[in-house]
Image (cartoon, rainbow, N blue to C red):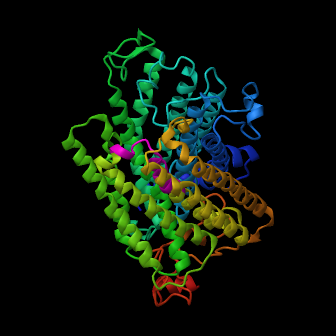
Amino acid sequence: MSSTATTIHTEAHAAHAEHELSFVRKYIFSTDHKIIGIQFLFTVLFTLGLGGLLALGVRWQLAYPWTKVPIFGELLWSDNGGAMPAEVYPMLTTMHASVMIFLVIIPGLSGVFGNFCIPLQIGARDMAFPTMNMISYWFMWPAILFFVASFFVTGGAATFGWTSYPPGAGNLQAAPGSLHGQTLWLLGLLCVGVSSLLGSVNYITTIVKLRTKGMSFFRMPMTTWALFITAILQAFALPVLTAALILQVADREFMTSFFRPDDLVINNEPAGPGGGQPLLWQHLFWFYSHPAVYIMILPAMGVVSDVITTFARKPLFGYKPMVLAVAGIAFLGFIVWGHHMFQSGMNPALGMTFMTSTMLIALPSAVKVFNWLGTLWGSRIRWTTPMLNALAFVSMFVIGGLSGIFMAATPVDIYIHDTYYIVGHIHYVLFGGSLFGLFAGLYYWYPKMFGRRMSEFWGKVHFAGSFVLFNLVFFPMHILGMGGFPRRYADPYFFETWKDTKPMNQMMTIAAILLGFFQLILLLNFFLSLRRGEKAGHNPWRANSLEWHTPEIWPGHGNWGARTPTVHRGPYEYAAPESEEDGYYPQTTPPPGSQAERAHAH
């Protein structure tokens, strides 16, 4: 380890020296990476519930337009007979997507597992910058408050979709009632960006500088590799989005014209100073937001890789190609943002470039799927709840990836753009992918986080219900979208063409409501297991990676006591000749017959 790394390592350990802390300092304003990871987890469970309720509001309107919304309708819109007012629907679609993307999936995977797992998996005592780590968590709460507050200001929440396209979203006069809500949305995203950027700097520094003795890059678990590459993505892409958000706030609040065109007229009046370019926002926004798709899916790929190898009891098939595939996806993610803009009138040669580069992403994605299947081939699978969710991730990611190839083709995308085909695709990638990956990681590392296991029976009930109902909700969207069914319409049945689709939408809404109820099983299992769950012991899954081999089940400050561990091999050597019958061969076990092995024995 270099002298710089030793200095950072020592300072981080000193900052967490074993001493008595108050409750507030230990559990609220904590600088311990494990507590911060758990804080992210509890926060994400809250925002997941909020985002789910917004989704059910959207689904109810599509199934039973302009009818009384159960439970909440009379409370919120009593002067409208409990039915949803027309102006509320675009708020729900905008805020559902915003909450689920920026307050659930990104912090749920990078925030929870990045904070909890990275130092443990590389043998570090903590993050390189513990105070910065604490600040990165607390920047999430202003974002949550801005999003929630936007519903209670004049005109209500943001209504221009999670993409916030100008000139509408960036123009003061274009939305006279929703000025405050749209601006609060922009400020909330700025806070999320600061949180993610601080976290990414911390992750990169920690992984590069604080790996323990013997922990080379190619001995790191895939979860750490995926989070490392995700952090690099965030570090390069987030400044672009941050700049774009600041410019749109300036357009709205200070009448600048970064995105305001010359000829914009609202209510037969000029809309203020012009000269800006609305398409500039799309370039800046998608330069971040397409890599953001991989920021949301790559950590789940790492988690799933660890879970599959643990319960297949086999080495990860093609470990180095898997690492290179993740890096390839990240690189290609930066050069394909224009496929979101095929309808913007771009030069056909440029469109062809974006189309080809988008299709190339299928190659490293296929490598990962092939390697997961190669890991499973001929293995002795343990059908645990984490494994079931990991396998659901793989199967749903394949469906989402295959549907994405169609959208990469410019002629096809022009037809299905802004239809429910797009909605189905994004949910197969981000719910069927990211959220099933989040569930897999939660069930897998719950024993390490809390010292107890969640109920396997109820975990499997939650999985089975979620898997079946998820497909009932989102697979029919592809069928509707191929027929041209439009998204973001509060009442598409106004058009004769779509009246026959109402029964299908009603079926999807019933399935969505049941899907929401099944998440209550997860919450009950989670909270009841905190006190009643079976005690887990040190390593209930008999995994080989480093986080399961701390001196204590719940490691205190510094994680490793007086001495950090020494790593002798990779994390997936389940089939090594020296391993035990079920492939158990921890990274900390020295090679047989070596001097280190003799010292270890004594």
Q: Position of residue 204 (x, y in %)?
A: 43, 52
Membership of 335 in magenta stretch: no
Residue 153 is situated, as x and y percent measured from the top left of the image, at: 64, 23
Q: Residue furthest right?
A: 532
Q: Point out the residue furthest to the front here.
A: 496
Q: Position of residue 543 (x, y in %)?
A: 57, 75
Q: Which image quarter is the C terminus in?
A: bottom right
Q: Does the magenta-highlighted stretch encompass residue 420?
A: yes
Q: Nearer the viewer, residue 599 or 477?
A: 477
- Whether residue 6 is visible, yes or no, is no
Residue at image position (76%, 47%) is: 23
Outermost residue, left direction?
A: 349
* Quadrant of the image occupied by residue 151: top right
Q: Residue at x 54, y 50 (%)?
A: 105
Left or right of residue 126: residue 521: right
As rendered, which of 237 and 169 lies closer to the eye? Answer: 169
Q: How many numbered circles does the render carry?
A: 0
Quarter of image, res 530: bottom right
- Which span of residues is magenta-colored? 414-431
Question: Who is closer to the viewer here, 63 or 592?
Answer: 63
Above-or-below relation of 57 to 273: below
Residue 558 visible to the viewer: yes
Q: Residue 178 placed where, x, y %? A: 56, 22
Residue furthest to the top: 269
- Position of 21 compared to 113: left or right? right
Q: Is residue 357 above or below residue 28?
A: below
Tell me which secondary structure the magenta stretch mostly adopts. helix
Residue at (33% x, 30% y) in the render: 279
Image quadrant in which the N terminus is located: bottom left
